[in-house]
């Protein structure tokens, strides 16, 4: 349903709101474009002039460390003018509506909004109400989607495993409240992995889990068996309005990733986490900092993947290199 709004008539990326409706060729183009930017961080001059003269506004209505800073770095490396609004000190605290904020920023000739919001659908809503030349990138909306996180995760998996075909991927933890898991599941299935397993207590799986193209499992030993990729998720307490668990220590005992449990996965399995990590709740420090962890590589890859998505969205608006 969002394909028509995300893509131009020529099938090029205009907005990036969700993985839903995007095909394997487009996801692969994002990964290939990101690869072309990946070496830049090692260069003395880390900039390319692809978005020179363009203005990008980061609108983060929810807290963020990784997403906000990597979007800022990515925009800077593409030579765009970038500003990050401090929502806490903006006029939204005086009752200004989201759309009035957007229209006021539009009046300053903005070319792209990067939006994080606690409400599912917020980025989509903004994309429907902005001027036609403006691109909107979803940096996480409620429990709905975090598509750039999913793409940097796909980039990290491809970096280590070379191809998606045949991979068994286990996603462990609070699937119910996770926008990251929803976007990852769509991307993994579109890119053609063999299996996506979701491992969680029943209370932390969505009711419609069987329609999501995953295998639900409630036991870590069974779920991790022979896995190529293990993705851990934190408990998203800010989205929990009732007791979903007996206690954090009980959760760690049953679903926390320890070195002993990781032995069930393949010897060369990689361990991922979108962050922020909660040590001793969903993952043991020895695993988070261990040889199979690629958690900090995910963060590094966020810059090149976000550069790819921003430059592709702007190119569909007629920017030339
Ligand atoms: N992974 C992620 O979205 O982290 P932040 O909340 O720090 O941006």
Image (cartoon, helix red, strand yellow):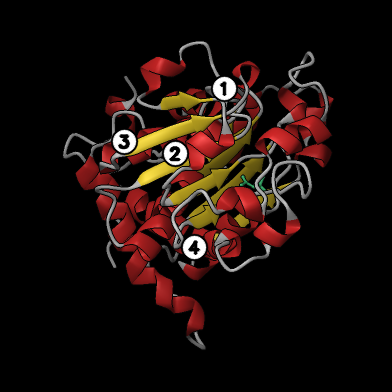
Circle 2 packing at 10 Å, graded few (<14), some (14-19), many (20+), is many
- Which residue is labeled 1 in the image? 120
Above/below status of 271 relative to 17:
below
Above/below status of 218 relative to 47:
above
The reply to whether dot 1 and dot 3 touch (C-beta < 8 Å) is no
What whole-number distance in Å separates the C-alpha atoms at marks 2 and 1? 16 Å
**What mark, if any, has residue 167 been given in the picture?**
none
Cβ at disc 3 under 8 Å from ligand 1: no
- Which residue is labeled 4 in the image? 301
What whole-number distance in Å separates the C-alpha atoms at marks 2 and 4? 15 Å
Cβ at disc 1 under 8 Å from ligand 1: no
Residue 256 horizontal/vertical position (percent) = 69, 41
- Which residue is labeled 2 in the image? 184
Residue 292 horizontal/vertical position (percent) = 55, 63
What whole-number distance in Å separates the C-alpha atoms at marks 1 and 3? 22 Å
The reply to whether dot 2 and dot 1 touch (C-beta < 8 Å) is no
Above/below status of 261 relative to 42:
above
Asked whether 32 or 158 is in front, the reply is 158
Q: Secondary structure at mark 2?
A: helix
Residue 23 in the figure: left or right of residue 68: left
- Which residue is labeled 3 in the image? 189
**Sequence order check, earlier mark of 1 and 3:** 1
Q: Secondary structure at mark 4?
A: helix
Task: Say which of marks 1 and 3 sits in front.
Answer: 3
What whole-number distance in Å separates the C-alpha atoms at marks 4 and 1? 25 Å
The reply to whether dot 2 and dot 3 touch (C-beta < 8 Å) is no
Q: Secondary structure at mark 1?
A: loop
Instruction: Please identify the quarter of the rendering in which residue 7 is found.
Output: top left
């Amino acid at each position: 349903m969002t394909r028509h709004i995300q893509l131009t008539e020529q099938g090029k990326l205009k907005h990036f709101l969700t993985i839903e409706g995007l095909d394997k060729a487009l996801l692969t183009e994002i990964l290939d474009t990101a690869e072309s930017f990946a070496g830049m961080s090692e260069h003395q001059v880390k900039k390319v002039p692809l978005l020179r003269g363009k203005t990008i506004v980061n609108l983060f209505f929810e807290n963020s460390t990784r997403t906000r800073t990597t979007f800022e770095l990515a925009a800077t490396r593409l030579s765009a003018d970038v500003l990050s609004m401090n929502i806490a000190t903006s006029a939204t605290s005086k009752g200004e509506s989201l759309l009035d904020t957007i229209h006021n920023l539009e009046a300053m000739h903005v070319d792209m909004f990067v939006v994080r919001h606690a409400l599912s659908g917020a980025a989509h809503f903004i994309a429907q109400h902005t001027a036609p030349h403006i691109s909107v990138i979803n940096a996480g909306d409620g429990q709905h989607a975090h598509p750039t996180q999913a793409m940097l995760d796909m980039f990290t998996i491809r970096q280590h495993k070379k191809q998606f075909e045949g991979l068994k991927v286990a996603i462990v933890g609070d699937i119910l409240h996770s926008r990251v898991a929803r976007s990852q599941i769509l991307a993994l299935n579109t890119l053609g992995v063999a299996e996506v397993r979701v491992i969680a207590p029943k209370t932390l799986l969505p009711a419609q889990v069987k329609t999501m193209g995953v295998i639900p499992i409630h036991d870590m030993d069974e779920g991790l068996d022979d896995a190529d990729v293990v993705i851990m998720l934190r408990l998203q307490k800010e989205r929990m309005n009732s007791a979903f668990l007996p206690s954090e220590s009980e959760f760690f005992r049953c679903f926390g990733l320890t070195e002993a449990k990781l032995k069930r996965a393949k010897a060369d399995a990689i361990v991922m986490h979108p962050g922020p990590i909660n040590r001793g709740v969903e993952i043991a420090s020895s695993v988070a900092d261990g040889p199979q962890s690629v958690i900090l590589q995910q963060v590094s890859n966020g810059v090149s993947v976000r550069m790819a998505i921003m430059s592709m969205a702007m190119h569909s608006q007629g920017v030339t290199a």
